[in-house]
Structures are given as C-alpha cells and as structure tokens.
Image (spheres, rainbow, N blue to C red):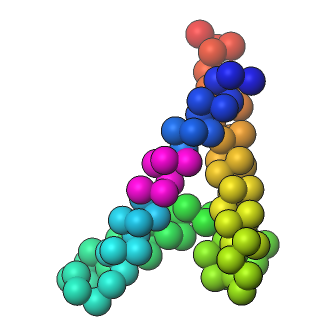
Amino acid sequence: MKTYLRLFAILLIVELLLGMLGLFLTQEIVPKFAESIGHLLNVLLALPLSLINPTWPFYTSPTWFGLTLMVINIVIHTGILYAFMKLRRKKI
C-alpha cells in the first residue's frame, strides 16, 4: 500500500505538470507542431476515462465533478503502473 500511495503522489505531480504543459502547448502563441504535441498530451492523460465519454475528465460542467474524474483517472493510471511493476518483480 505504501508503494501504491508513493506512486499515486508521483503520478499526481507528473500529470499536473504534463497537463499544464499540454495546456500551454495548445495555446495559439506556440507553433502548430507544438500545439499538436499539446493535444496529444491531453489525449494521453485522459485516456481511460475518455473512452467512456470523449469530454471527460477535462470538459465537465461542475468543477468538483471534473476534479473527481481527474483523481479517478490518476487512480486508474497508478493501478496500471503498480500492476505492471508487480508483474516485472515476479518475472525477475
């Protein structure tokens, strides 16, 4: 459980930084190539929940709902990474 919480904290910080970078790169002040990279970052960060609804987790009407969806998304990412790490440890 301690490893899971540590991974969650690391992914929370990394995904917040990548999300801010993605938002910056989607602004019109950067070249089109960087804008496409920003859109790709946003798509990858929203991947598990965006399969259910393409507007989730970023474009939801109540702010609390969007934040809840982002936390759920990070929990899913952490679970996938944790399972991958456990499988790698068993193989070694």
The answer to whether 88 is drawn above or below residue 43 in the figure is: above
- Does residue 52 show up? yes
Q: Nearer the viewer, residue 45 or 33?
A: 45
Residue 30 figure quarter: bottom left
Q: Is residue 24 magenta?
A: no
Residue 73 figure quarter: bottom right
Number of marks in picture: 0
State the image coordinates of residue 2 (x, y, percent, origin top left): 68, 22
State the image coordinates of residue 74 (x, y, percent, origin top left): 65, 51
> Is residue 70 found left or right of 38 in the rendered image?
right
Q: Which residues are magenta?
A: 12-17
- Outermost residue toward the top in this view: 92
State the image coordinates of residue 25 (x, y, percent, origin top left): 32, 75
Residue appearing at x 59%, y 10% in the figure: 92
Residue appearing at x 54%, y 44% in the figure: 11
The answer to whether 46 is drawn above or below residue 61 in the figure is: above
Q: Nearer the viewer, residue 76 or 84?
A: 76
- Does residue 84 show up? no
State the image coordinates of residue 44 (x, y, percent, origin top left): 53, 63
Residue appearing at x 68%, y 66% in the figure: 67
Residue 17 figure quarter: bottom left
Q: Nearer the viewer, residue 44 or 71?
A: 71
For the stretch drawn in magenta, the main secondary structure is helix
